[in-house]
Image (cartoon, helix red, strand yellow):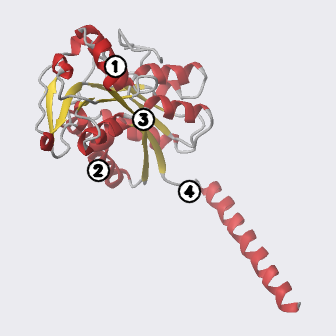
Amino acid sequence: MLRSLCRNSVRALATALVALAACEGAKRGVRGPLTVYAASDLALAFEEIVPLFQRASGDSVRVVLGSTGNLTQQIEQGAPADVFFAANVSYIEQLRGKDLIAPESQRLYARGRIVLATSERSGIRVQSLTDLLKPEVRKVAIANPAHAPYGLAAREAMQAAGVWTQVEPKLVLGENIRQALQFVESGAADAGIIALSLAQSPGIVTAPIADSLHRPIDQAAAVIRSSQNAEAGAAFIAFVVGPEGQTIMMKYGFVLPAGAGMSSDSARPAGAMPPP
């Protein structure tokens, strides 16, 4: 009985010390890693950008990738994000309308592009959207247009090209643009429409899609209002829109939209896609 009481007392003391240390850490401003919620099209670019930022700033960064719509919903429900890099500015505006971002932190950081994709191993090649009608193209992967801006752009492009009705029964919907790519890589889909930023994946053959066939994929970021790492979050956004970050973004096929790096109050893009 005495030993049991001692063990319980030790555990209680240890718990109290951990809580005290946490409180003292909070007083000193000690923070956990910067949590960045980011659209899946940023996967390859952020693999290069994040280590550079960490070395330059000394801040630790944790990246959570997903479809923009799903990440937006998670943030609305209180997910512990410090910064959000959305694949379309309209989702940042949606959070802004609910007072969930620091409005002065909002920045455009890139304009995305979509491309046709096939696996080198499959032997199937598509050069235009009409090639998706070929009988050997039985399954076509896109991100779910309901919550993924790149999927919405893919649908718009097929509608503009006049092939949507015929291709729709062939569709395999990914939860995000990375999963759409994985369907092509694995052979679960014979072709797909993916982000140009992911087109450097090994074994993937691509063909361009005219950006005139869909509304601009203007992408924006902001610090989440509830963040305890707001200063580091703003610094990370500044790094992405700065010279080093933009060099890497362009390497992965992103282009600089008009007004990138400026507050949306002074440079709100025309044609931004609304949430579906």
Q: Residues within 10 Å of mark 3 (few under 14, many from 20)?
A: many
Label of residue 168 in the image: 1
Amino acid on which the number 3 mark rests in the picture: Glu
- Front-most of 40 and 190? 190
Q: Earlier in the sequence, mark 4 or mark 3?
A: 4
Does the CB distance between marks 1 and 3 fall below 8 Å?
no
User: What is the three-letter code of the residue carrying label 4?
Assistant: Val
Tell me residue 271's x, y (percent): 36, 9
**Disc number placed over residue 175 in the picture, else none:** 3
Name the residue nearer the viewer: 91 or 108.
91
Distance of label 2 from label 4 (alpha carbons) = 22 Å
Q: Using a 10 Å C-alpha cutoff, classify the residue at mark 2 as few (fewer than 14 neighbours), some (14 to 19) or many (20 or more).
A: some
Mark 1 and mark 2 residues within 8 Å of each other at the beta carbon: no
Residue sticking out furthest to the bottom:
2
Residue drawn at the location 10% of the way across and 38% of the way down: 123
Residues at circles 3 and 2 in contact by the CB criterion of under 8 Å:
no
The residue where tag 4 is placed is 30
Pick the quarter of the image with the N terminus.
Answer: bottom right
Residue, disc 2: 52
**Where does the image place residue 57, in percent across and percent down from the top left?**
37, 51
